[in-house]
Image: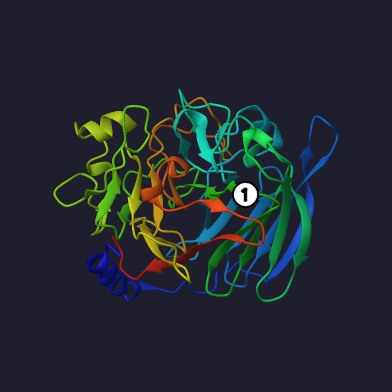
Amino acid sequence: MLVRKGLRFAMTLLGYVGALGASSGASAADASRSAFGQMPTGETVEAITLRNDRGLEARIITYGAALQSLLVPDRKGERSDVVLGYPTLDGYLAKGEFFGATVGRVANRIARGRFTLDGQAYQTPVNDGPNALHGGTKGFDKVLWQVVEVQEGPTPSVTLRYVSPHMDQGYPGTLTVTATYSLDETNTLSVDYRATTDRPTVVNISNHAYWNLAGEGSPQGAMGHLLTIPADHFTPVDSTLIPTGEFRPVEGTVFDFRMPTPIGARVRDADQQIVFGKGYDHNWVVARDLAPEPRLLARVEEPTSGRVMQVLSNQPGIQFYSGNFLDATIVGKAGKLYRQGDAIVLEPQMFPDAPNRPEFGSVRLDPGETYRNLVQFRFSVSQHDD
């Protein structure tokens, strides 16, 4: 592992924040289902709402297995929706932007949409310049998932399933994917992604929520958020945002987030990597291998509200995207335009273009194996006022 020093600081962070107390408007933990809209083909899109007894409330929709809203109390116990999204299904169908979505079969980018597996070449649709992004033109974010189970109780949850057929978007193998969202009493929203296949394939699934801990309708963007990533290296990219294969030290660069740093402090730096991404859109190397249990990949604090989010996963990398392409053409849930820098994305994952880079680790999945990415978003509030 590359980040012994970085992980040491994480233990200090755990003592820096206090747990969220029960919100004055909190109700008993439960789960409920309702209609969210209708697909052009006539199928109903459902919304499943999970609540714990400390004020957190998550709404997941079956289109894209997406996190559509998440209400989180601030330091004063007042709740705000901290994820970007649309108020109705129409927005997701017209211009999804991956808001809250499950992305796959292979999250992030594949160079030219091409890879080779067992000597066979495969071509996936290119939808990001010359490259494939988040599974292709109709990835997991643009399909209707089925509800397998909804559970109530102290840890309410919903399990969704999608079966991706052989050669769907050019990928081999019939892939059966489940996404289980659960909300527990420690104020942790977990997303447990699992997948099995009937023949060798490649898999790298993640969640693409856009976060603004001040609230998605707040006039404050996300550039004042304090970000910490316990990684000593990142993977630099070329002008099309494909990794070069290098593991570059963050020390002395604008990519050093080993200590809490305002995102906006260096997001417009003249560093060539920032120019390529029009901001941050890169993978940080927290480790070189999968972990048996989720580990800390990032911590975000919004100083005014006091909201703190820790992102944990068993994956070795995290893609940090600073909302560079939000261009004030989308009206969000609060009736406000989403502008550049209004939110950030933190995606736990294997490294980008891994199917073409064996040095990045394998994303191969064989029959009899189970792929798993267990993502946890853990919420608390800072003890101090700013």
Q: Could you tell me residue 269's position as x and y percent?
A: 21, 35
Q: Which residue is mark 1?
A: 200
Residue 278 visible to an observer of this rendering: no
Identify the residue shown where x is 42% and y is 43%. Answer: 352
Q: Could you tell me residue 161's position as x and y percent?
A: 73, 53
| Quarter of the N terminus within the rendering | bottom left
SS class, disc 1: loop
Q: Tell me where residue 298 sits by quadrant.
A: bottom left
242 w.r.t. 184: above or below: above
Structural crowding at the residue carrying mark 1, measured as other residues with C-alpha within 10 Å and reported as few (<14), some (14–19) or many (≥20): some
Would residue 312 appear left or right of 41 to someone viewing this image? left
Q: Amino acid at mark 1?
A: Pro
242 w.r.t. 106: above or below: above
Q: Could you tell me residue 10's position as x and y percent?
A: 31, 69
179 w.r.t. 130: above or below: below
20 w.r.t. 108: above or below: below
